[in-house]
Image (cartoon, rainbow, N blue to C red):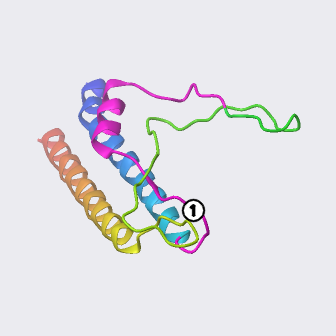
Amino acid sequence: MVSRIDQAFAFQERALNLRAYRQQVLASNIANADTPNYKSRDFDFASALKGAMAGQGQSDLAMEKTSPMHLSGSGDQGLVSLQYRSSLQPSADGNTVDMDIERGEFSENAVRYEAGITFLSHQIKMLTAALQS
């Protein structure tokens, strides 16, 4: 029974984790709007969610050592492959952050995160009601 409950919540858990990570990426873009040569980044949520549900990950990537003094480690990116967003009009200093696009994506992602929380809360309430019956 516990495994069935876990399976019921697995999709929402992965979706919310990806939404939270995307929010961090978008916030990083906004925070670096005035940083010279900063390239805005994002990822395709749908393909990342498909990969998460299929159990595919990229956690086996090794970090690049540019100095012999660097410690070895793993580049744990999880299930997401960040990509550079193409800019319609990059600034003179090489920054590609378009604040209108970033704010729009940030707001849309926040609304979708809240919708996921609401849906998950509703699922928990229904499950609780079914167990109490």
**Viewer-proximal residue, 44 or 121?**
44
34 shown above or below 124:
below
**Viewer-proximal residue, 113 or 6?**
113
Residue position for label 1: 38
Q: Amino acid at mark 1?
A: Tyr
114 with respect to 82 (left or right): left
Quadrant (top left/top right/bottom left/bottom right) for the C terminus: top left
Quadrant (top left/top right/bottom left/bottom right) for the N terminus: top left
Q: Residue at x 54, y 73 (%)?
A: 92
Query: Main SS type for the magenta part?
Result: loop
36 shown above or below 16:
below
Residue extending furthest toward the right = 69
39 shown above or below 33:
above
23 within the magenta span: no
Q: Residue at x 88, y 38 (%)?
A: 69
Q: Position of residue 79 (x, y in %)?
A: 44, 35
16 shown above or below 109:
above
Q: Quadrant of residue 118?
A: bottom left
Residue extending furthest toward the front = 92
Q: Quadrant of residue 80?
A: top left
Q: Residue at x 47, y 56 (%)?
A: 25
Q: Position of residue 82 (x, y in %)?
A: 46, 45
**Viewer-proximal residue, 107 or 3?**
107
Looking at the rendering, the stretch of residues picked out in magenta corresponds to: 33-62
Secondary structure under tag 1 reads: loop
Q: Residue at x 27, y 29 (%)?
A: 7
Q: Position of residue 113 (x, y in %)?
A: 30, 58
* Structural crowding at the residue carrying mark 1, measured as other residues with C-alpha within 10 Å and reported as few (<14), some (14–19) or many (≥20): some
> How many numbered circles are shown?
1
